[in-house]
Image (cartoon, rainbow, N blue to C red):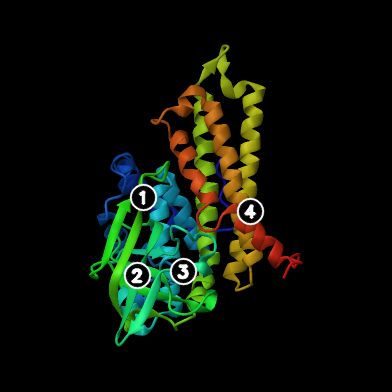
Amino acid sequence: MKVKRDVFFGDEHEAFRDSMRRFVAKEISPRIDEWEEQGCYDKAIFKRMGDLGLLGLSYPVEYGGQEADIRMSLVFWEELCRCKALGFPMSVAVQTDMASPSLAHAGSKEQKENYLKGVCSGETLMAIAMTEPNHGSDVASIETKAVLNGDFYRVNGTKMFITNGTQADVINTVVRTGGAGAGGISLLLIDTNTPGFSVGRKLNKMGMLSSDTAELVFEDCLVPKDNLLGKEGKGFYALMAGLEKERLAACALSYMAAQVALDEAIQYAKTRVQFGKPIIAHQVIGHMIAEMMTDVEASKRIAYHAAAMYDAGTPCNLEVSMAKLFCSETALGVIDKAVQIHGGYGFIREYPVERLYRDSKLITIGGGTSQIMKHIIIRESGLRFDQ
């Protein structure tokens, strides 16, 4: 299939794409099967990526970042997905665009020196702990408590479904320091060597196997009050400020999973012969591929539109939510068709489409479910009449 340069990206972005593609092909793709088998990546890869300046693309130069635009981040996310698995790219996105944005936006200079520099260099692996066993989409209702006692917060609670949870050095932890609702939410940076912190268990998952996911337990963890991120009671708003970029990352993982599955389906359809000719020559298969191509292109365009608004500083919660909903749900359909084109081979683990089929489901759940995206779309459109 012809690959045309996308006018959305400039020469600098395309030069970065070339280097990223070589890096992924040389240092990530050959290890994906191993990481999938062991249920986690090799932590040393983060230091390698940090050495290459890949982990702080959008962050200030003084902390080891590149101060690049959102298009550069899109290239980064897109090319990571060419490893033909979503687990490891998800773990990297947590480091670069989910756990650390609130640190970059709300952290003190000392906190950025102590933590953000390490995030950018790959020497500090970061996770974010929001979800709890009984609280997911409703972040404002979380129960993990942090009670200030002198110079320390005493933290007690349990977090669930935490990406990078078994390997992280520091956890950006959503805690309750006040009363009910969003106004009682704060953020604490909790080092994983803090007494009272433990990994309750590593979770066995359907997909995303090259990324670890864990239950985390906090039992009378004494966390210095200097590790409070931003102001007490303002943690919810610090989190919300970073959600647009997080969801753009989810968009990129979605449409690139679909793109990779499409590429695999085309390659298979060209070589698989049935009834005397390659199956791509049969109209039914050709039409499936045409639909897939259209869906992938539409996903890219809605994501690029939202990214352009983000880059321009234009409020885009509505557009990003639309993009996240469309891209994630569309990816499921495209990848399903890719498996169908592979027939029985699409059900076998040695074929990438089988892995992508399992991996892609999480994107409709993590970072805001499809149902929550619809809720935001209606609210941002001014069509909520029950408030």
Which label's residue is closer to the chain start, 2 or 4?
Answer: 2
Alpha carbon of mark 3 to alpha carbon of mark 1: how far?
26 Å
Mark with earlier residue (1, 2): 2
Labelled disc at residue 301: 4
Q: Residue extending furthest top?
A: 276
Residue labelled with disc 3: 68
Residue bearing the label numbered 1: 211
Q: Nearer the viewer, mark 2 or mark 4?
A: 2
Residue lying at the far bottom in this picture: please name it. 150
> If you read the primary sequence from the N terminus, does the residue marked by circle 4 or circle 1 appear first?
1
Q: In which quarter of the image is residue 130?
A: bottom left
Residue at image location 46% in from the left, 80% down from the top: 178
On screen, 192 above or below 230? above
Under tag 2, what secondary structure?
strand
Give me the residue at 52% from left, 24% from top.
343
The residue under label 2 is which amino acid type? Asn
Q: Residues within 10 Å of mark 3 (few under 14, many from 20)?
A: some
Question: Disc 1 residue type?
Answer: Ser
Residue type for callout 3: Ala
Task: Locate residue 209, reporting x and y percent.
Answer: 37, 44
Instruction: Give the Cα separation between the discs numbered 3 and 2.
Output: 38 Å
Q: How far apart are marks 3 and 4 (CA)?
A: 21 Å
Disc 3 secondary structure class: loop
Q: Which of 90 and 386 is in front in this view?
A: 386
Which numbered marker is on residue 156? 2
Left or right, 164 with reference to 106: left
Q: In this view, does 177 lie to the left or right of 37?
A: right
